[in-house]
Amino acid sequence: MKELATYLRTIRKQRGLSLKKVEKAAGVSNAYLSQLERGRRNPPHPDILKKLARVYEVPVSDLLAAAGYLEEGKGNTRQSVEQAFEHVISDPAYRFGTRLKGSALSLEAKRFIVEMYEKMTGRKLLGKA
């Protein structure tokens, strides 16, 4: 539950949304959202996570996995994608075009960049999904 709480708060703040705005857009009370973000509630029903995914513009599977509904396979965990992305942007042979300034990339965008790197180099950084 702690992973979901942190993730929900982080993406809401990254999107510049207040709890009130999320409440209005998703139809979920801001008091409930606040409790979720503080880890004070059990994981919400998947239908609520679907609503939140639309508002936050993230894959539903990310929220379902963070809430413990899905087991993420090797290569699909947030941590493994983040680590692979850090490897890509720090590779000196590919230093051009990988320096991103002032933009927060979604997990899907990072995964895409890692997959393109894997195709270009023949190296495998992520396991099969």
Image (cartoon, rainbow, N blue to C red):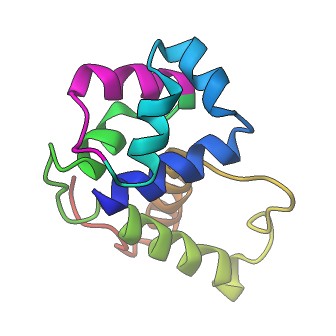
* Residue 8 pos. (x, y %): 48, 46
* Residue 14 pos. (x, y %): 68, 47
- Asked whether residue 122 is drawn in magenta, I would say no
Q: Is residue 25 above or below residue 1?
A: above
Numbered circles on residues, count: 0
| Left or right: where 97 falls relative to 77 | right
Q: Residue at position x 46%, y 76% from top?
A: 83
Q: Is residue 33 above or below residue 68?
A: above
Q: Is residue 63 above or below residue 23?
A: below
Q: Nearer the viewer, residue 11 or 110?
A: 11
Q: Quadrant of the N terminus?
A: bottom left
Q: Nearer the viewer, residue 126 or 81?
A: 81
Report the residue that reaches farthest toward the right.
102
Q: Nearer the viewer, residue 108 or 113?
A: 108
**Main SS category, magenta section:** helix
Q: Residue at position x 21%, y 27% from top?
A: 45
- Asked whether residue 52 is drawn in magenta, I would say yes
Q: Nearer the viewer, residue 41 or 50?
A: 41
Q: Residue at position x 29%, y 38% from top?
A: 61
* Residue 55 pos. (x, y %): 54, 23
- The answer to which quarter of the image holds residue 3 is bottom left
Report the residue that reaches farthest toward the bottom.
92
Q: Residue at position x 20%, y 65% from top?
A: 74
| Left or right: where 79 falls relative to 110 | left
* Residue 35 pos. (x, y %): 41, 43
The magenta-colored residue range is 41-55
